[in-house]
Amino acid sequence: MSIMAKLVREQVNRAMSNVRQAFRGTAARNNHGKLIGVEMEGLAGESVSGELMQHYGFTSAPLPGAEFITVPVGGNSKHAVVVASEDGRYRVVLKDGEVSLYTDEGDFIHMKRGRLIEVETETLLVRAKTKVRFETPLVELSKDLKADGEIEDHTRSMQLDRDLYNAHGHPNGPPPAPAQ
């Protein structure tokens, strides 16, 4: 190697020794706002503040103890960006090819092999301003169905069925009792 190449290499190594490389950190706490700021413990117990970058349409607020991969923008820890987060304490066990969203409380949406999507939670609330439509030949329930509004099929509503039943009579007999 030429003397010039050695001098250039030494100069680059000196410059790079002042540039912080990507590192692994551990979450301490979050600061919520338009962007999620994170406080983390970096290498050798150092305290580092950063910004949690997330994919559009997905957001999370990792709990203390979660692990981060952090990139110091421009090689400076004062502008650290978390580009990945992980928390194996709560991760759902998956098979190859599966996908899941999960929380530390045990809620999850699990897209399983065999084209099965499993959702587990205490209460599932769906808000739709116009309607909810299921295009399937069968809907099964394991327990009761409660409706605050009218229930109807392609023939008529349940209320119309009740009205027909309650009004009908048999020859020489009274209408049905009890009424529906």
Image: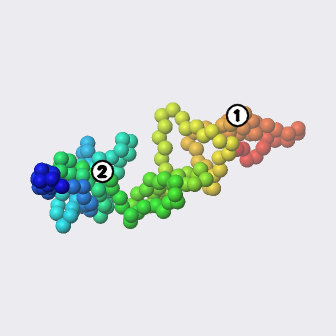
User: Residue lying farthest right?
Assistant: 171
| Label 2 Cα crowd, 10 Å radius (few <14 / some 14-19 / many 20+) | some
Residue lying at 43% horizontally and 56% vertically, measured from the top left: 102
Instruction: Where is residue 129? Give x, y as percent.
Output: 48, 34
Which numbered dot is residue 120?
A: none
**Residue bearing the label numbered 2:** 83
Helix, strand or loop for disc 2: strand
Residue lying at 44% horizontally and 53% vertically, measured from the top left: 101
Give whichever of 61, 138 is nearer the camera: 61
User: Which of labels 2 and 1 is toward the front?
Assistant: 2
Give whichever of 140, 29 is nearer the camera: 29
**133 lies above or below 140:** above
Which numbered dot is residue 154?
A: 1
Residue lying at 51% horizontally and 32% vertically, measured from the top left: 130
Give whichever of 158, 91 is nearer the camera: 91
Q: Is residue 31 visible?
A: no
Give whichever of 95, 117 is nearer the camera: 95
Amino acid type at circle 2 is Val
Which is more N-terminal, label 1 or label 2? 2
| Label 1 Cα crowd, 10 Å radius (few <14 / some 14-19 / many 20+) | few
